[in-house]
Amino acid sequence: MNINYLIILFLASATVVFFNTCSGDDEVKLNITHPAAFVVNGLGNSISVINLNDDTKVEDIGLNGAKYPHHIYLSPDKSKFAVAITGVDLSGGHGGHGGSGSGYKVQIINSVTGIIEKEIALAKLPHNAVFSPNGSELWIPQSDTPSHVLIYNTTDWTKLKEITVGHMTSEVTFAADGSKAYAANTDEATVSVINPITKTVETDISVGVTPVGAWPATNGKMYVDNETSKTVSEIDVATNQVTSTINLGFKPGYVAYSDHHSELWVSDSDNGKAIYFKLVGGVWTKDGEIATGADAHAIVFNADGSKAYVTNQGANTVSVIDLGTHTKIKDIPVGNKPNGIVLKQ
């Protein structure tokens, strides 16, 4: 065989090997077919994947150089998730963060392969990005004065609408039944209620100081964590009225409702605990607490209501809690400053 041909063949093979081995972490195709938790590492700039069959971390997903990822939401068909890239560390609190900067974007990631399918570049800081109940739209808050909620078509990623809301909006969420959307206006102490069909603001509801998110519950309510006033405001979805205010005495990191146990869980970011409440005589009353880890943050429950998962930003762990006994089973080491978490089951 001609020696020049052999040299060319060798160089071509070496080139193929070079490009395959030098691809970034974001290009490594995974095969996540097991039930999984996806954990956002705010300072680790990655997504940790936990196998829910044995509650062990199995791998990390890179984010193509993105800095300070925040909360994460799964699409209704569970095929992908959206991660907001804030470009700033929000672990100390959400007030005052917004406006113009750089590196703001939302990444759409395949939940099986871990491949980034789409990046949406943004002009203002996004605290989260949430899919509409039928998955046809992606809603993204833009924290500013005033703020806007951007709505994208998830088929071709064209922008459909901008909705003006309040000042320095943090999270945008949907009620459990999908009938309304809620924008927490952090610097105005209000929550804007949005009709998802007409895409107009129905009303603004006054809540506590520095509201971060209105978190959905299957009991027909939304629960707003107010960082500065250290309270939780209960909003009735049907009437748009605040029906209860829970005085906490600590800065809430997150609120989640366990429909299997009719419990309201609030993360105590000041003391590294998860506090759970029960309705007693129509009043939300503290029923117990569980030490999780420093700067406890997001809380999610698994599908059968047997476990809770809590991210601990200051401990770099996720706590697994037995809901039947209200005891911690284990801590799972993940990345640096884990904040958002979502379960694919």
Image: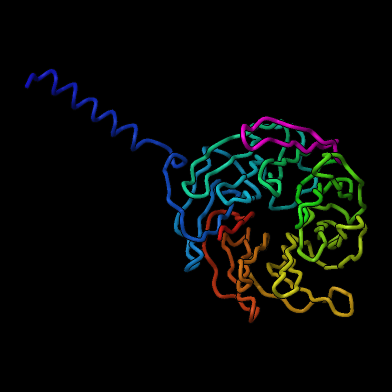
Please check the rendered image and state whether residue 157 is part of the magenta-colored stretch, yes or no.
yes
Q: How is the image coloured?
A: rainbow
- Name the residue located 53 percent from the left edge and 38 percent from the top edge: 117
Task: Say whether residue 281 is left or right of residue 268.
Answer: right
As drawn, 3 above or below 330: above
Q: Where residue 19 appears, x then y in whole percent?
A: 34, 32
Q: Residue at x 64, y 76 (%)?
A: 323
Q: Residue 169: which quarter of the image?
A: top right
Q: Main secondary structure of the magenta part?
A: strand
Question: Looking at the image, which is closer to me, 138 or 265?
Answer: 138
Asked if the stretch drawn in magenta spans residue 206, the answer is: no
Task: Locate residue 244, reporting x and y percent.
Answer: 90, 66
Identify the image quadrant of the N terminus: top left
Residue occupying image coordinates x 89% and y 65%: 245
State the residue lying farthest toward the left.
1
Q: Which residues are magenta?
A: 146-165
The reply, left or right, for residue 174 in relation to residue 316 is right
In the rendered image, residue 7, in percent from the top left (x then y), is placed at: 16, 22
Quadrant of the rendering where the C terminus is positioned: bottom right
State the image quarter where residue 313 is shown.
Answer: bottom right
Q: How many circles with numbers are drawn on the protein? A: 0
Q: Which residue is painted at 80% across and 66% down in the image?
A: 219
In the image, residue 156 lies at what x, y percent? 62, 32
